[in-house]
């Protein structure tokens, strides 16, 4: 999802080599070294990840290999080549307690395995010796891939009554705006850890309610508590990210409602339901 928009939003003066899994398995040190050698880049942007949060609870080793180990594999190859790495991470590295937005230097303490693996990836990259930028993001959706808004739109169009949790907070973030912001950070040579998310704060229910209303089915969606909707992975209640450091570098994404309206408008001609949802 993010990888395709990083390609679509690449600035005109960037020469980009985009590789899928077949082109470079990021868990394979030799494949990563070969890819870096062939492209001779200034930066590696790693959009590969294990993102199925609930499935990760059972597929522990696979999720750790991709999210926890691969950033170290890429980092070591990048350090040897003297190039930089951009690694997306997640608000799920935080425990979700409290009621103020999470700052970059707040202590992480993940509540699920996905968050644990992403935190391990941040640390493996830092330990690799490569110059790097970790950007924690959240609640992504876009033109490609599966996402919460896409699932909600399919359910609304199919007329399915839907309960959605109303006690987890964050900001649904469109991957095209995020990708443009990431390119800005790459081009200004940002380093360390930054938080980037759409503006404002939402609950999943508020996002779903907007989508069901847009689809003309507002009565089909009702709020519930996380306790009433058990999932294999726990989610943080407060995932709100403090994005002021990135904003100071010129990267402030539009409010989440505006991003969602744009995404919905682009789907007005798309009928039917989606596979696997
Ligand atoms: N989605 C969210 O809501 C969210 C929230 C917070 C943070 N993030 C982070 O944002 C980044 C982008 O997420 P996304 O949602 O765009 O991910 P995504 O849509 O799930 O895409 C992940 C990609 O990784 C590829 N991949 C899997 N194993 C690979 C391997 N061994 N080598 C190379 N590529 C491999 C997958 O290829 P196949 O298609 O072949 O499987 C897929 O194209 C990730 O770092 C993620 O952790 C995402």
Image: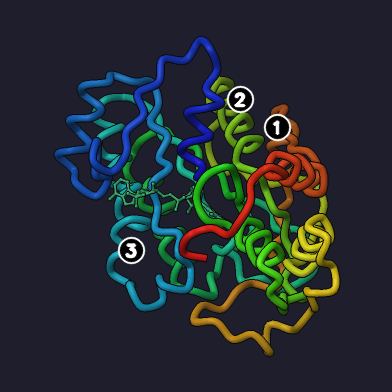
Determine whether 67 is above or below 182 in the image: below
Q: Is mark 1 within 8 Å of ligand 1?
A: no
Tell me the residue that label 3 is attached to: 64
Distance Cα–Cα, label 3 vs label 1: 30 Å
Determine whether 102 is above or below 205 in the image: above
The residue at the point 66 percent across, 35 percent down is 177
Task: Give x and y (percent) for residue 155.
Answer: 65, 67
Q: Is mark 3 within 8 Å of ligand 1?
A: no
Quarter of the rendering containing residue 211: bottom right
Quarter of the rendering containing residue 255: top right
Query: SS class of the residue under badge 1?
Result: loop
Task: Give x and y (percent) for residue 100.
Answer: 79, 63
- Residue placed most toward the observer, 134 or 164: 164
The residue at the point 69 percent across, 29 percent down is 249
Distance Cα–Cα, label 2 vs label 1: 7 Å
Query: SS class of the residue under badge 3?
Result: helix
Tell me whether circle 2 and circle 1 mark residues in contact (CB < 8 Å). yes
Q: Earlier in the sequence, mark 3 or mark 2?
A: 3
Can you tell which mark lies on residue 184?
2
Q: Earlier in the sequence, mark 2 or mark 1?
A: 2
Tell me if 97 is positioned left or right of 33 in this view. Answer: right
Residue farthest to the bottom, as pictured: 228
Q: Is residue 196 visible?
A: no
Task: Give x and y (percent) for residue 171.
Answer: 73, 55
Tell me if 168 is positioned left or right of 10 in this view. Answer: right
Tell me the residue that label 1 is attached to: 251
Query: SS class of the residue under badge 2?
Result: helix
Tell me if 229 is positioned left or right of 202 in this view. Answer: left
Q: How is the image coloured?
A: rainbow
The residue at the point 53 percent across, 34 percent down is 5
Distance Cα–Cα, label 3 vs label 2: 29 Å
- Residue placed most toward the observer, 273 or 254: 273
């Amino acid at each position: 999802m993010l990888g395709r928009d990083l390609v679509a939003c690449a600035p005109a003066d960037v020469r980009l080599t985009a590789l899928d899994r077949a082109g470079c398995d990021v868990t394979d040190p030799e494949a990563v070294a070969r890819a870096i050698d062939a492209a001779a880049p200034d930066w590696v942007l790693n959009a590969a990840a294990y993102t199925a949060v609930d499935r990760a609870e059972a597929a522990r080793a696979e999720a750790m290999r991709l999210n926890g180990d691969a950033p170290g594999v890429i980092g070591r190859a990048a350090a040897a080549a003297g190039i930089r790495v951009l690694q997306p991470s997640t608000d799920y590295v935080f425990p979700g307690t409290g009621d103020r937005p999470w700052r970059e230097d707040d202590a992480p303490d993940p509540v699920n395995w996905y968050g644990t693996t992403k935190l391990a990836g941040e640390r493996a990259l830092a330990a690799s010796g490569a110059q790097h930028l970790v950007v924690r993001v959240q609640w992504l959706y876009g033109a490609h891939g599966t996402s919460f808004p896409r699932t909600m739109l399919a359910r609304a169009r199919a007329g399915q009554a839907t309960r959605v949790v109303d006690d987890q907070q964050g900001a649904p973030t469109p991957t095209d705006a995020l990708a443009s912001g990431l390119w800005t950070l790459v081009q200004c040579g940002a380093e360390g850890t930054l938080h980037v998310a759409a503006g404002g704060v939402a609950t999943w229910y508020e996002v779903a309610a907007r989508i069901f209303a847009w689809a003309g089915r507002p009565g089909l969606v009702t709020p519930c508590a996380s306790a009433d909707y058990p999932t294999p992975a726990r989610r943080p209640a407060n995932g709100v990210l403090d994005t002021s450091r990135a904003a100071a570098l010129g990267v402030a994404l539009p409010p989440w409602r505006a991003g969602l309206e744009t995404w919905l408008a682009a789907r007005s001609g798309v009928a039917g339901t989606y596979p696997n949802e």
